[in-house]
Image (spheres, coloured by chain):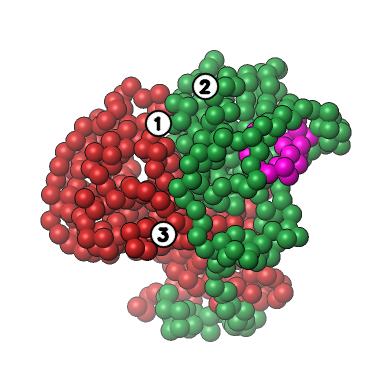
């Protein structure tokens, strides 16, 4: 049965955007091999009502697993449930997200089933009946084409690499029980804390405004925040130097040891462009750099650069962006 | 407390990379190597736990070629007590193959904690730690940025997209360490001298079946950047025009 399973990630009883990306990636692969897409949806009672949305993006079947203890991620229950379904369903492949949850879950399921996992992939191809996957390695300085032997093959897809594509059908709904009792798990998520801003996440924001040491002081990040607010769909990131100095939390850091992002627009403010930072953002579609040093490496990869004092230029840009958005 | 830290020898990412003659690997000629960044945070976490407990042992384990002994030696110079080198000619890409070899060794060690870096910055699969946990049937928490251990139980925090989770688990356990948990110490002169006398045991690695290979490797397309729009505030209107009409992101 050449079907493909997609793990539809939820948080607090809501589908995440990466769930639709996983279904989209699974749909493409299933179409190439002539199979169906089955989406596995774990969550608290009521989560089955999200099945229709998965159908809109290409799921033929949604397997809803509802449990009082699945309002929060349960790694052990999710592993047992996904592994059981993948084994019993005879799938050709299973697609996870390379999100915080998916990068925790995918390897556990792969180990349980003794099958290969290609993690953090940006493209999936077929070569005859072999699955190939593109995976950025060495902080994005090379791209490997991975060849997976055996079936099922597990893959986790990098957030933002597969844009959710509507492919509507009416998903058939099945229900199932968790294959391990979440209430009896050894590892238990006790609490989910929303991030301070509770705004757009770096991995999902179409626009990222990122600040470096060139901002000179922590309080000047206000200018970056204001520029992000002017866009309305922007998240704020930073360099490692800035998070090491405590100006911003580590979770905002973009680069080799932080987040890897690929937004439509990345504006680097007062960032010189150390290789470790470029590693995290060079996949952005359009890059703008504002820096006082015209020889800064960031300008070499930026589509558009302005040389000058960020403390003067950023407020002017905020005004201009506000005006531009008011026009449209 | 007996703690194992699994570390990997990786290429120094500062260098300019070329693809090797096999078209499926980086040409390592003339390149330097170091411990993967996140692994140094795992070492630091282990050393701090031992220091806090006032007793215990920290063992660094590395799978790799002979040169992996340099990597282990650096961990010893940071304060790790002894090393185990699982010898292979070449580190496979397949995280399952690596994890099987490590699990075979770790399963006999009676460790309270097994620590990994969140991911190796070269292969970036972020999978070996949780696969080892599964193979040994141990509780596992990945990508932790805070950690408290007391009385054979632990509480960790892990960062999600725009949120964080507080996770409880019993020991023994496998943990993988994210940035934010600590800043890794640098080896002191005394540490470097002392490391020369610390033992490193070498044994052949029992690598598992390989089911993922790198069939080809490519450099990503160069970005054709470098266009300076102008200087100072005066350049802002032109930038906005380009964002509207050319990049179409406004």
Q: Which mark is residue A132?
A: 3
In red, which chain? A
Q: Is residue A318 left or right of residue A215?
A: left
Tell me the residue that label 2 is attached to.
B172
Q: CA distance from mark 3 to mark 1?
A: 34 Å
Mark 1 closeness class: few <14, some 14–19, many ≥20 residues within 10 Å? many
**Residue B74, placed above or below residue A93:** above
Tell me the residue that label 1 is attached to.
A189
- Name the one closer to the observer, A104 or B198: B198
Chain B image colour: green
Q: Position of residue B99 (x, y in %)?
A: 52, 37
Labels 2 and 1 within one chain:
no
At 29% from the left and 50% from the top, the residue drawn is A92
At 69% from the left and 54% from the top, the residue drawn is B12
Q: CA distance from mark 3 to mark 2?
A: 37 Å
At 54% from the left and 63% from the top, the residue drawn is B217
- Name the one closer to the observer, A243 or B115: B115
């Amino acid at each position: 049965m050449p079907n493909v399973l997609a793990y539809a990630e939820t948080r607090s009883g809501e589908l995440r955007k990466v769930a639709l990306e996983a279904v989209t990636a699974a749909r493409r692969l299933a179409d190439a091999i002539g199979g169906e897409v089955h989406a596995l949806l774990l969550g608290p009672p009521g989560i089955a009502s999200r099945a229709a949305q998965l159908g809109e993006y290409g799921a033929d079947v949604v397997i809803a697993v509802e449990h009082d203890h699945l309002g929060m991620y349960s790694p052990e229950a999710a592993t047992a449930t996904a592994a059981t379904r993948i084994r019993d369903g005879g799938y050709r492949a299973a697609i996870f997200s390379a999100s915080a949850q998916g990068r925790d879950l995918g390897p556990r399921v792969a180990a349980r089933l003794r099958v290969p996992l290609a993690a953090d992939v940006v493209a999936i191809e077929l070569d005859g009946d072999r699955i190939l996957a593109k995976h950025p390695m060495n902080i994005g300085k090379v791209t490997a084409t991975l060849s997976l032997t055996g079936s099922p093959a597990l893959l986790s897809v990098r957030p933002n690499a597969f844009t959710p594509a509507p492919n509507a059908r009416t998903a058939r709904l099945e229900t199932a029980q968790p294959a391990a009792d979440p209430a009896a798990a050894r590892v238990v998520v006790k609490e989910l804390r929303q991030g301070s801003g509770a705004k757009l996440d770096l991995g999902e924001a179409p626009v990222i405004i990122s600040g470096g040491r060139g901002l000179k002081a922590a309080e000047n990040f206000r200018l970056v925040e204001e520029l992000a607010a002017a866009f309305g769909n922007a998240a704020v990131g930073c360099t490692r130097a800035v998070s090491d100095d405590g100006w911003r939390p580590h979770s905002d850091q973009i680069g080799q040891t932080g987040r890897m992002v690929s937004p439509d627009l990345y504006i680097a403010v007062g960032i010189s462009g150390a290789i470790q930072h470029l590693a995290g953002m060079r996949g952005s579609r359009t890059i703008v750099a504002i820096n006082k040093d015209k020889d800064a490496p960031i300008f070499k990869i930026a589509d558009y650069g302005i040389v000058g004092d960020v403390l003067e230029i950023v407020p002017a840009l905020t005004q201009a962006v506000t005006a531009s958005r008011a026009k449209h | 407390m007996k703690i194992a830290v699994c570390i990997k020898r990786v290429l120094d990412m500062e260098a300019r990379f070329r693809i090797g003659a096999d078209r499926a690997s980086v040409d390592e000629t003339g390149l330097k190597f170091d411990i993967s960044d996140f692994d140094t945070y795992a070492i630091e976490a282990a050393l701090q736990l031992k220091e806090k407990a006032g007793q215990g042992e920290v063992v660094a384990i590395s799978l790799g070629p002979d040169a992996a002994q340099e990597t282990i030696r650096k961990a010893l110079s940071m304060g790790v007590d002894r090393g185990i080198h699982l010898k292979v000619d070449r580190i496979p890409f397949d995280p399952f193959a690596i994890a099987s070899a490590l699990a075979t060794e770790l399963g006999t060690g009676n460790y309270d904690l097994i620590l990994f870096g969140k991911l190796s910055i070269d292969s970036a699969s972020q999978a070996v730690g949780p696969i080892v946990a599964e193979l040994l049937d141990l509780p596992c928490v990945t990508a932790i940025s805070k950690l408290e251990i007391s009385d054979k139980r632990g509480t960790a925090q892990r960062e999600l997209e725009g949120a964080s989770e507080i996770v409880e688990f019993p020991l023994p356990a496998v943990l993988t360490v994210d940035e934010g948990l600590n800043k890794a110490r640098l080896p002191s002169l005394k540490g470097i001298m002392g490391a020369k006398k610390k033992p490193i045991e070498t044994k052949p690695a029992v690598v598992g079946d390989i089911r993922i290979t790198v069939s080809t490797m490519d450099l990503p397309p160069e970005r054709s950047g470098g266009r300076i729009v102008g200087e100072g505030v005066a350049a802002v209107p032109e930038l906005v025009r380009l964002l509207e009409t050319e990049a179409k992101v406004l």
